[in-house]
Image (spheres, rainbow, N blue to C red):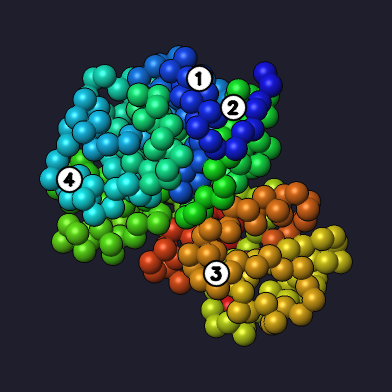
Amino acid sequence: MRTQLLKADESSLKLAAELLKDGQVVGIPTETVYGLGADALNETAVRAIFAAKERPADNPLIVHVADFAELEPLCHVNDMARKLNEAFWPGPLTMILPKKDIVPTVVTAGLESVAIRMPAHPVAQRIIRLSGCPIAAPSANRSGRPSPTQAQHVFEDMDGRIPLIIDGGDSDVGVESTVVSLTGDTAVVLRPGGITPEMIAAVLGTCEVADSVMRPLREGEEAPSPGMKHKHYAPKAPMTLYAGQTAQVARRICAEYDAAKEDGEALILAAHDHLPLYGDRHVFDLGPTAASAAHALFAALRYADTLGVHRVFSEAYPEEGVGLALMNRMARAAGFDIVHV
Ligand code: AMP
Ligand code: MG
């Protein structure tokens, strides 16, 4: 199959909508990361997403809508969902709600709940509206690769596997949506993202965070969000995180980097303000803030893979605000190899 990579304009969006209506899979820009979309109500089309991604069938997909009214046929809406819709949709928040029968079980990997999001990216919204279908879409990477934040990343992973990728520029947020379960009495964040637990608590009064967010699953433990049991976001080279006071962290990373250099190329990921601490060593600039680091992280991991480095060393970030989402992804990329300096 030849894969077209087209800039977002009215004619390419119409083509995307036609392909989606026809049961095909299309690469779509969103504000979190790029998605691999198909008609959520067409079981064959949804199976094609799993095939293109090589995604395990036990990892459910997020269904994307353009209007709150579209939830009604798909799931049982409650007050928490209405309030979060008012506050954060469209945006980087996915709600887990009890599903209705119309949603094929292949979308939810057999679960009785369904994940739903209304993306803010105008291109994603336009494609959903033109297609007239709810769009099931996981991140547009091959399973086990970092999520794509640029159309070119999607092309690297999906060339020959899908007919069309729409280029809508760099993803703004850069990490996947916050996943919040609304199936119980209180909201529980299963995966941190751009909308923080603090922001959700400000709207609902309380918000819990699943305790598996910042640690590996124990042997035999069931994942609250199935995606969390799979190895995610890992670069090819082993990666280590260093937490602690800035100057000490930098000194330690420099020493580890210099030792690693004797065996080949290595890469350091560091905050912009800390760059002078690393001299002329090879550093990927994560920008000035935790938000800029979240935006840059997946591109940094892909850069490490492209360079073929054999070690990656990264500064850790405080687990507050969007730093929780950033550290959730960084810790998984590092296989939870975190050194407290
Ligand atoms: P991705 O498609 O890569 O953005 O990942 C979607 C995430 O949403 C995965 O981590 C899934 O495990 C999670 N998810 C989707 N549906 C459900 C559900 N019904 N219950 C819990 N987590 C879900
Ligand atoms: Mg993913």
Density class for disc 2 (Cα within 10 Å; few <14, some 14-19, many ≥20) is many
Residue at x-position 72% and y-position 78%: 278
User: Which secondary structure, mark 1?
Assistant: helix
Image location (x, y in percent) of residue 164: 59, 27
* Contact between labelled residues 2 and 1, with CB atoms less than 8 Å apart: yes
Q: Nearer the viewer, residue 128 or 92?
A: 128
User: Which quarter of the rendered picture does the C terminus lie within?
Assistant: bottom right
The amino acid beneath tag 1 is: Leu
**Disc on res. 164:** 2
Badge 3 or badge 4: first in the primary sequence: 4
Badge 2 or badge 3: first in the primary sequence: 2
Q: In this rendering, is residue 40 above or below 187?
A: above
Q: Nearer the viewer, residue 332 or 28?
A: 28
Which of discs 1 and 3 lies nearer the camera? The answer is 1
Mark 3 → mark 4, Cα distance in angstroms:
36 Å
Residue that label 4 marks: 82
